[in-house]
Image (tube, rainbow, N blue to C red):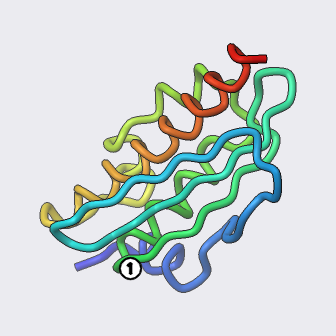
């Protein structure tokens, strides 16, 4: 059974889409369930100024992606890196045990996008 928050973020996901010329992009997938998440970041002064996502997957995957974007928008990159799968799941009022991997994917996609951004800064 899904919480009301999960259902809301599934039915009305926030921050869906792409950011053209994003500062950082992270993509992860789970071959077992078929979920694929892509996170796009716009960073200004070491803060996440904008964040968007595209997710191909189940309702829990969409809800965790949506909640993640709400949790980290406006945060510093280090604050965003501290967001874990547990943080995302708790913010949604919990997830069924078989869907916890979705919150892992969301956190992993965010971390990959931040690493992509930081890697581009080093090579400048």
The residue lying toward the viewer, choosing from 7 and 17, is: 17
Residue 73 placement: quadrant: top right
In the rendered structure, the answer to whether residue 94 lies left or right of residue 23 reads left
Whether residue 73 sits left or right of residue 112 in the image: it is: right
Quadrant where the C terminus is found in the figure: top right
- Determine the residue positioned at 85% across, 22% down: 45
Q: Which residue is mark 1?
A: 59
Q: Position of residue 47 (x, y in %)?
A: 77, 28
Going by the picture, which residue comes out furthest to the bottom?
11
Instruction: Check disc 1: other Cα within 10 Å, few if <14, some if 14-19, many if 20+.
Output: some
Q: Give the left or right position of residue 59, taking residue 121 as reference.
A: left
- Residue 66 image-quadrant placement: bottom right
The answer to whether 3 is drawn above or below residue 53 in the figure is: below
In the structure shown, which secondary structural element does the residue marked by tag 1 occupy? helix
Most foreground residue, 86 or 46: 46
| Identity of the residue drawn at 53% across and 46% down | 26
Q: Residue at x 61, y 46 (%)?
A: 25
Which residue sits furthest top?
122
Quadrant location of the N terminus in the rendered image: bottom left
| Up/down of 89 relative to 35, above or below | above
Q: Residue at x 82, y 51 (%)?
A: 21
């Amino acid at each position: 059974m899904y919480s009301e928050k999960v259902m809301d973020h599934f039915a009305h996901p926030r921050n869906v889409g792409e950011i053209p010329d994003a500062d950082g992009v992270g993509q992860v997938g789970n071959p077992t369930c078929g979920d694929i998440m892509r996170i796009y970041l716009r960073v200004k002064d070491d803060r996440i100024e904008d964040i968007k996502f595209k997710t191909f997957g189940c309702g829990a995957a969409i809800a965790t992606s949506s909640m993640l974007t709400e949790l980290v928008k406006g945060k510093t990159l280090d604050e965003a890196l501290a967001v874990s799968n547990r943080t995302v799941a708790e913010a949604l009022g919990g997830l069924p045990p078989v869907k916890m991997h979705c919150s892992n994917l969301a956190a992993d996609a965010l971390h990959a996008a931040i690493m992509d951004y930081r890697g581009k800064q080093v090579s400048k």
